[in-house]
Amino acid sequence: MPHWSVYTGSSEPHDGIGQLPAPPPWRAFDGGPVLPAPGDTDDEAAVSPDRVHRARTYVATPESVQLVNAALCLRRPLLVTGPPGTGKSSLAYAVARELGLGPVLRWNITSRSSLADALYRYDPLSRLYAVRPGADGEGPEHDGRRAMGAVEEHLRLGPLGTALLPHDRPRALLIDEIDKSDLDLPNDLLNVLEEGQYEIPELVRAARHSGAGGMARVLVDGTDTPVSITRGRVRCRAFPFVVLTSNGEREFPPAFLRRCVRLKLRRPGRDQLTEIVRSHLGDPDDQAVSLIRAFLDRSGSGELATDQLLNAIYLTGVAGLDAVSREQLAEQLMPYLSAAADDDGL
C-alpha cells in the first residue's frame, strides 16, 4: 500500500488516520480549541443497524480506494456519481468505520435545502418567549452574559456545521443527492468548504456585549453534548471527509467540480456482484449464482440496483419454493427502475 494511503477498503477498523500525511499548504487549517474525536461508528448500531451492516460489508473497488485516499490527503470533498444502488452512500459509512472517524454526519438534500440549515438552526421565537429583562441593579456585564446564554440555548449546529468543528481528526460528512438542490447551493457550499470556516451571526452579535469572553456552549448534530464556540466563529482543524453523492441528473459549475475529487461508480460486474453477495449473505449457492447471471442479463436492457439482487437471493433462499416459483418471485423482486423498460421478463 503506498505510504500516502490510509484507507484500504478491507472493512477492518484501524488507526491509520493517524498516519495521514500533512495537508498541502493551501489546505491547512488551524481552528481551536481542539475537540477530541467522537466515539466509534459502531455506536450507531442502536439507531441504524442497516447503516452499520452496509459499512461492514461494503466492497470497495481499487479506483474507489485510491480516490478516497486522494480526497483525504488533499483535504478535498469527494464527489461520487453513479447509478442508484452502486454504493455511493455506503462508501462514506465504510470509510468512517475503517478509519474510526465517528458516527457519520448526514445531510439529505432536497430542493428546499439551504446552506444555513446545514450549518446551524436557530429558533428566535423560542428565545423571544424565554428572554426576560434583567433584575434592577444588575449591570450591563450581567445583561451581556444573559444575552449570550439566551442565544446559545436556542441554537443547534447542523451536520455541516458540526463537521467543521475543530476536531483532532476528520469527521465524516455525507451530503446525499446534491443534484436535487437548487442551482445556487453547490456554489454556496463551495465557499464554506473552501474556507473551512463559518460564522454564527447571532453569537457574534451577542459576543460583542458579553462579559464572559464571548464563549458559548452549543448543541451539535447527533448528540446532546454541547461544545464551546468562541465569539461565534467556527474553523476546522482536521478537514472533514466529505462525500457528496449524485445520480448524474445535472451538471455542476466548473468552479465546484475543480475543487472536488471525482469518483464515478459503475455497475458492478460478475466478480464484484459475487463478492457483494458473499459479504452480505455468505458464499452464493447454485440458486444465487443463477440469479446473479439473470440480474446481469437483465441489466443490459434497463436499470437495476444491487439491493434488488440481494433481496431476491435472500427471499428465494428462505421461502422454500420450487424452482419455477423461485424464478417468478425473483422476477417480481427485480423490476426495472425505469418504467419504459419494465415490461421485460427474466
Image (cartoon, rainbow, N blue to C red):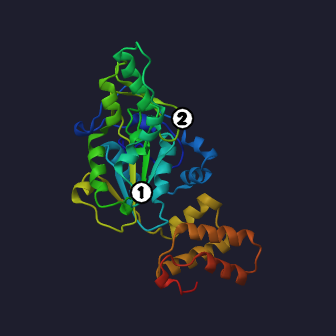
User: Along the line of sight, which residue is nearer the eye, 142 or 64?
Assistant: 142
Residue 36: x %, y % from top left:
46, 29
Residue 338: percent from left, percent from top: 47, 78
Q: Could you say which quadrant of the image residue 164 lies in?
A: top left
Question: Does dot 1 land on a helix, a strand or a loop?
Answer: loop
Residue 241 is at least partly visible in this image: no
Position of residue 287 measured from the top left corner of the image (x, y, whole percent): 67, 74
Amino acid carrying mark 2 in the image? Asp
Q: Residue at x 58, y 70 (%)?
A: 309
Tag 1: residue type?
Ile
Of 339 and 276, which appears nearest the observer? Answer: 339
Q: Tell me residue 342's x, y (percent).
A: 52, 83
For residue 107, side relative to residue 279 (left or right): left
What residue is shown at x 39% (from left), y 61% (from top)? 111
Name the residue carrying label 1.
109
Report whether 76 appears left or right of 15: left
Q: Which quadrant of the rendered structure holds the C terminus?
A: bottom right
Residue 224: image tag: 2
Residue at x 42% of width, y 23% of height:
146
Identify whether 86 is placed above or below 300: above
Q: Nearer the viewer, residue 60 or 169?
A: 169
Occupied quadrant, residue 263: bottom left
Q: Residue at x 30, y 38 (%)?
A: 197
Asked which secondary structure carries label 2, the reply is loop
Do labels 1 and 2 touch, CB within 8 Å? no
Give the spatial CA distance, label 1 vs label 2.
Answer: 23 Å
**Total residue callouts:** 2
Is residue 244 left or right of 346 when viewed as pictured? left
